[in-house]
Image (cartoon, grey):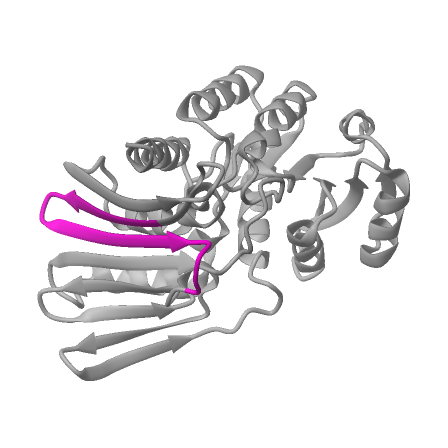
Amino acid sequence: MKQLNWGIIGAGRIAQQFAADIALVDNAHLYAIAARELSRAQAFADDYQAEQAYGSYEQLLDDPKLDAVYIATPHNLHFEQAKAAILGGKSVLCEKPFTVSPLEAQTLFELAQREQVYLMEGMWTYFLPAIQKAKAWVEQGRIGKLRHIKADFGYPIEYHPRRREYDVNLAGGALFEMGIYPIALTHLFCKQAPQSLQVDSTLAQNGVEDDVCSLQRFGDVKATLGTSFKCRLGNKAYLIGEQGYIVIPDFFRASECALYQIDECLEEFSEPHQGHGFEYEIAAVTDEIQQGKLTCAVVTPEDTVAFQQRIAEMRALCLC
């Protein structure tokens, strides 16, 4: 099987997980890593058996053997880095959140279309078998008509104004950092703009949102979403229909889900990840790139722009 040569921009925790999971995929090869310091890139390359290490992102993008790049830097850097990769003719998988505004997202997709290169947001949750199973149960009518979605994602993060998660200059805030997950899960089942959107939030000392609850209505479906830097939330998702419900523990990295009718568990699904869970996304995206596609069928450009629009709307209400 022909392997696609991947490069990674950034050498942090997520980049390390992605690199480890490439080894589990037959059609992808970790070819290169770029970091701001060559020593850090070289250490990363040694740990994950990458062929090349670069001390600048420009050097990586100039490598003619590189086919695709995974951007794993803080989200405030995504726009310029994805733009450079696209203009360099490289296929791009950019970690979520994709950008920090709907306009930036739309601009990148238009540029990728013009340059005829693949571009996708790394919403890896959509590819997880447990999420796909829950989606299939809903589509098969196993819970009847969908009425409620409940999803939250939160972990306590100590406040410091220059900490990345809080830093105003780095597009800090709970919605970009964690809230993207419940927003994306809701969109998977309600592919439309909400008819109504309410937000209750608190702000950190520097003005970024650190705890957010939201009630949104999509026709007959109500979504109750939460995200927080203040406390560990349940981090579960519930899809509730007129005849039953589905529960997905740790839905953002789901490996299991269960189908209930009232109080009776009718079916359980479990598929532990071989790695961190990125392997499903890597295999699918690599296959699409090799087929010559320009966008992803699972996480479409329209999906990504919708995520950005929800975050923008919710952040605006947090400041009211």
- Magenta range is 212-232
Q: Tell me how many marks there are.
A: 0
Residue drawn at the location 46% of the way across and 41% of the way down: 176
* Residue 307 placement (x, y as % from top left): 37, 37
Classify residue 262 by image quadrant.
bottom left
Residue drawn at the location 54% of the way across and 22% of the way down: 112
Classify residue 310 by image quadrant.
top left
List the single residue furthest toward the bottom. 264
Q: Nearer the viewer, residue 234 or 249?
A: 234
Left or right of 23? Residue 200 is left
Give the vertical position of 37 relative to 13 (above or below): above
* Residue 209 placement (x, y as % from top left): 41, 42
Q: Main SS of the magenta segment?
A: strand
Give the vertical position of 280 relative to 57 (above or below): below
- Specify whether residue 125 is in view: yes
Whether residue 126 appears in magenta in the rendering, the answer is no
Q: Nearer the viewer, residue 10 or 200?
A: 200
- Specify whether residue 139 is in view: no
Q: Nearer the viewer, residue 149 or 231?
A: 231
Give the vertical position of 133 relative to 216 (above or below): below
Of the 4 image quadrants, the one containing the C terminus is: top left
* Residue 288 placement (x, y as % from top left): 54, 41
Residue drawn at the location 32% of the way across and 37% of the way down: 318
Q: Nearer the viewer, residue 129 or 264?
A: 264
List the single residue furthest toward the top. 114
* Residue 2 placement (x, y as % from top left): 71, 47
Whether residue 215 appears in magenta in the rendering, the answer is yes
